[in-house]
Image (cartoon, helix red, strand yellow):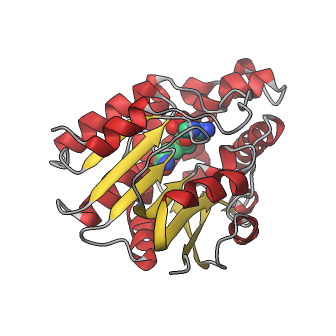
Amino acid sequence: MYNPLVQQTQTINRDLSIADTRPYALGYTKREFSRLELQGALLHELTEDVLRCAGIGPGMRVLDIGCGVGDVSILAGKLVGPKGLVLGIDRSADAIDIADRRATEAGQCYWTRFATAELDTFYCDELFDAVIGRLILMYLPDPAATLRRLARFLRPGGVVAFQELAMPLARSVPEGPLFSQCRDWIVGTIERAGFETDMGGKLPMTFAAAGLPAPQMNFAGIIGGGPDSLIYNYIAETVRSLLPAAERVGVTAAAEVEIDTLAERLRGEAVERQACFMPATFVGAWATTAM
Ligand SMILES: C[S@@+](CC[C@H](N)C(=O)[O-])C[C@H]1O[C@@H](n2cnc3c(N)ncnc32)[C@H](O)[C@@H]1O
């Protein structure tokens, strides 16, 4: 179905900033797209909670920035329903193709739409009721500047809602050497590649620097243990996606990681120690702009 809003975002491209030359740390492999889907499943309720608290509901028009393969957009699409509109944007055309297919499979193809776009060049001359995103601000060179720019696409009294990682809080109880090693590889790679490991904690100062009101916040995390948890796969697939970047920035090497057995070794460690793995903790933050 023709959608003038999406059409416009695909055709109008106004560059307002200097290009970010840092290679994206997680890459764009098929395996990374599957990892995003697994992460989306693990985070589903936690993200839905943030969106509901922010007031995302029926009939709203929502812009999801850095949408990846569409998990947050499709979740927002469920909340806004067929009388609303969600536009997910991402720089990866391959991710956008997958997101598009998944929205169609979810029965949302008429109101959950996607477009390939760089956030700092995205332009649209219609207004949204909400700008949302998950795990995106941490990858931006100047998240406050991008937020400030994108907030211009919000109607007065619009909503801004984000969910970002507080990576340094990742832990295992009791401590597990392999878990700690994975955490250090992941945090070290993100840090040395020039991205933000504590974006969750920096959300209030980022909102302030973007000229937004102080946000309301919540805190949540992905947690797992025992023989059947998906958490081992999630950690190992995150290490797998980061491995090229980890090698590039000198954090570790494939021979040390032994990626193909990593998930099973993590499972073994957790089961042997009856451990609780807490690999990813998230801050949700939302605010309503002035009328
Ligand atoms: C970790 S993924 C998160 C995807 C999605 N928000 C989710 O939670 O499943 C980050 C996404 O941000 C996108 N991204 C990063 N920087 C971007 C930029 N400057 N413009 C557009 N997309 C960007 C990447 O292509 C990637 O798909």
Residue drawn at x 80%, y 41% is 188
Examine the image and state in which quarter residue 84 appears.
bottom left
Residue drawn at x 57%, y 35% is 14
Relative side of 6 to 259, left or right? left
Relative side of 122 to 187, left or right? left
Work out whether residue 208 or residue 9 is closer to the camera in this orientation and state it: 9
Residue drawn at x 62%, y 63% is 281
Work out whether residue 91 or residue 290 is closer to the camera in this orientation and state it: 290
Q: Is residue 227 depicted above or below 239 in this figure?
A: below
Q: Position of residue 290 (x, y in %)?
A: 55, 80
Ligand 1, by image quadrant, is top right
Relative side of 37 to 121, left or right? left
Q: Position of residue 262 (x, y in %)?
A: 59, 33
Work out whether residue 274 or residue 209 is closer to the camera in this orientation and state it: 209
Relative side of 45 to 142, left or right? left
Q: Is residue 4 depicted above or below 286 in this figure?
A: above
Q: Is residue 225 visible?
A: no
Q: Position of residue 150 (x, y in %)?
A: 56, 54
Work out whether residue 133 or residue 33 is closer to the camera in this orientation and state it: 133
Q: Position of residue 160 (x, y in %)?
A: 52, 67
Residue drawn at x 40%, y 32% is 10
Q: Is residue 125 visible?
A: yes
**Residue farthest along the front direction in this orientation:** 125
Image quadrant where one finds the N terminus = top left
